[in-house]
Amino acid sequence: MTRYVTDDVQEVREWLDRIYGSRLLMGSISDGAARLAVSVADAGSFRTTDLAIPGVFTCRNQNIDTVRVGVVVSGTATIDDGDAVNRYGPGDALMATFPRDDLLSRAENLRIRTVALPLDLLADVAGAATNGPAVPPRLLSRSALGPAASRVVADTITLTDELLTGPAAAHPLVVGNAARLLAAGVLAAFPTTLTLRDEIPADRADATPAVLRRAVDHIEAHYAEPGLSLADIAAAACATPQAVQYAFRRHHGTTPMGYVRQVRLAAAHADLLAADPTGGATVSAIAARWGFYHLGRFSAYYRSVYGRPPRATLAI
């Protein structure tokens, strides 16, 4: 176990790059709040971290090839994957990165425990293949399937940390089994195409207009809640998350969280129309109110839908 604390901004950047890989593109770190505290346990086949960084931190994760799962201990984490904007608070488990991701992440006074695993290990535990002509495995939800699934991830990381810091860490068999335990916990908590191959026919049959209607009704009633997740929507629709995914793709050509993103964009559009720029209203503040923290990505998305940049709407 390695522990490091620094308040030097450049060292913060170097350590985060070392932990998360060279494809992590650092964004901003709020001035005067860059005191990084990190503990790392590297077992070879997997690595756990306990990371704390106060203030506001933004970065872009692009083409990272590892699976990294996290559990928020305190503060908040927001992830914009281009399809949806998800916000996580204490106790929430999240898929921080999945192979071929292109993410924008924002942390506010965040402490998070994470584990990084190779995709091949997850595929092996799931009994699936990741190479050859087959379609690469896909992540179906960045959020864990409810509070119970989040607890599974948290408990598994805790157990693994205890193994790695105790005398059993010297035994390769213990480390290997710990890695497989972590992989099994991740597969149980997050839906991917690695584990849902046999469920697809039934889920497609359940992707009915009634399921879609209940899901849409729930989204329309709760889209302003930062913690709205696929698990919440599926529970309200009385269907599995996979069935809800298929219903939205079949009837709306998007995912459930993509639909949430559309509804939130419409809310931002309404706020832009109603705002008074002479009174201090800004595009960035309105975008952030609805979970769009990256102004460039928000502007591009807004223009694609409304045909003009958001600043033009604000100036009307």
Image (cartoon, helix red, strand yellow):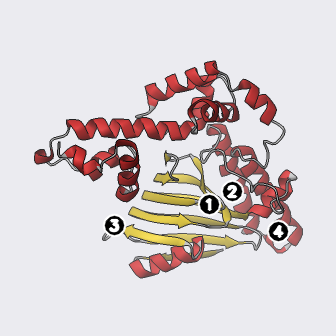
Residue 223: in sight, yes or no?
A: yes
Q: Position of residue 305 (x, y in %)?
A: 39, 43
**Left/right of residue 225 with respect to residue 206 in the rendered view:** left
- First in sequence, mark 4 or 1: give its number: 1
**Left/right of residue 155 with respect to residue 23 in the rendered view:** right
**Residue wearing tag 1:** 114
Q: Which mark is residue 168?
A: 4
Q: Is residue 205 above or below residue 57?
A: above
Alpha-carbon span between mark 3 and mark 2:
29 Å
Under circle 4, the secondary element is helix
Q: Position of residue 82 (x, y in %)?
A: 50, 52
- First in sequence, mark 3 or 4: give its number: 3
Q: Amino acid at mark 1?
A: Thr
Q: Are marks 1 and 2 in contact (CB under 8 Å)?
A: yes
Residue 3 location, quadrant: bottom right
- First in sequence, mark 3 or 2: give its number: 3
Q: Which mark is residue 43?
A: none
The residue under the point 23% across, 37% down is 273
**Residue wearing tag 2:** 157
**Residue wearing tag 3:** 30
Query: How many residues crowd mark 3 within 10 Å: few (<14), some (14–19), many (20+)?
Result: few
Residue 88: in sight, yes or no?
A: no
